[in-house]
């Protein structure tokens, strides 16, 4: 009668060590890939929601967003930013304000936004995709601008709705180089790459 041969303690230990090494290599990669997908999903959802809100406001106002009122007036960018948002976007992207007189508050999907009108030429909206307030983490932020016709005619290098400071019309080489230094170039790179964080993306999230 044959006796079943079991694993020795040494064999079990070697197997556990191998499993541990594989896990140590693969788990961080899986976690990083999941973080990338989560960021891009939230970023794309916010962009789509804002784009749709602009289209609905344009239809209601009978006016292209390029010709909206971008003047900061006597109150400056913060107060003018609230008035701009309330006039054109609030109906389609309701926000629960937590600072009176400034555009800071929570959207219904949990994204926290801030914003201001700048130089009478564009509306800057900063979305904290994780919903955190005043806890800056660059990999949770997505800064996007609604540009006026005057700005586009002057610079001719942005789309009506585009990333702020680093636009999607820049070359991919430029975006990769600058993304490594300044986060604002990174969302532009992601959009240019078809809403994807590719293998040569120069930062970890």
Image (cartoon, grey):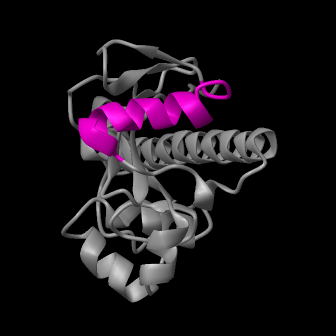
Task: Tell which of 141 and 117 is nearer to you.
Answer: 117
Residue 39 colored in magenta in the image: no
Indicate the quadrant where residue 159 lies: bottom right
Q: Residues in magenta?
A: 72-93
Q: Give the percent coordinates (x, y) of residue 21.
A: 30, 47
Q: Is residue 136 visible?
A: yes
- Looking at the magenta stretch, what is its main secondary structure? helix
In front of the other: 120 or 168: 120
Task: Tell me what residue is drawn at x 48 percent, y 71 percent.
Answer: 150
Residue farthest to the front? Answer: 74
| Quadrant for the N terminus in the image | top right
Where does residue 99 sit, x and y in percent of width and height?
Answer: 29, 15
Residue 84 percent across, percent down from the top left: 48, 37
The answer to whether residue 13 shows anywhere in this view is: no
Q: Is residue 152 left or right of residue 75?
A: right
Q: Percent x, y for residue 75?
A: 26, 35
Tell me the quarter of the picture where residue 174 sits. bottom left
Residue at image location 58% in from the left, 64% down from the top: 160
Position above or below: 38 against 186:
above
Residue pictured at 30% horizontal, 55% vertical: 204
109 to the left or right of 171: right
14 relative to 95 in the view: left or right:
left
Identify the residue at horizontal 42%, vertical 57% (top origin): 122
Q: Is residue 79 found left or right of 195 in the rendered image?
A: left
């Amino acid at each position: 009668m044959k006796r079943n041969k079991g694993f020795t303690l040494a064999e079990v230990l070697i197997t556990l060590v191998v499993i541990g090494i594989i896990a140590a290599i693969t788990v961080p990669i899986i976690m990083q890939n999941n973080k990338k997908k989560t960021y891009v999903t939230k970023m794309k959802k916010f962009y789509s929601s804002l784009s749709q809100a602009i289209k609905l406001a344009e239809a209601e106002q009978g006016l292209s967003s390029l010709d909206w009122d971008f003047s900061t007036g006597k109150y400056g960018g913060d107060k003018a930013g609230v008035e701009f948002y309330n006039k054109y976007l609030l109906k389609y992207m309701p926000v629960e304000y937590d600072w009176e007189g400034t555009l800071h508050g929570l959207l219904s999907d949990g994204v926290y936004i801030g914003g201001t009108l700048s130089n009478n030429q564009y509306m800057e909206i900063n979305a904290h995709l994780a919903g955190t307030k005043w806890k800056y983490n660059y990999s949770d932020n997505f800064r996007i601008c609604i540009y006026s016709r005057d700005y586009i005619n002057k610079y001719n290098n942005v789309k009506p709705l585009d990333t702020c400071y680093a636009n999607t019309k820049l070359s991919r080489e430029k975006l990769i180089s600058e993304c490594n230094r300044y986060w604002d170039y990174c969302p532009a790179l992601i959009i240019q790459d078809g809403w994807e964080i590719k293998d040569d993306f120069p930062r970890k999230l």
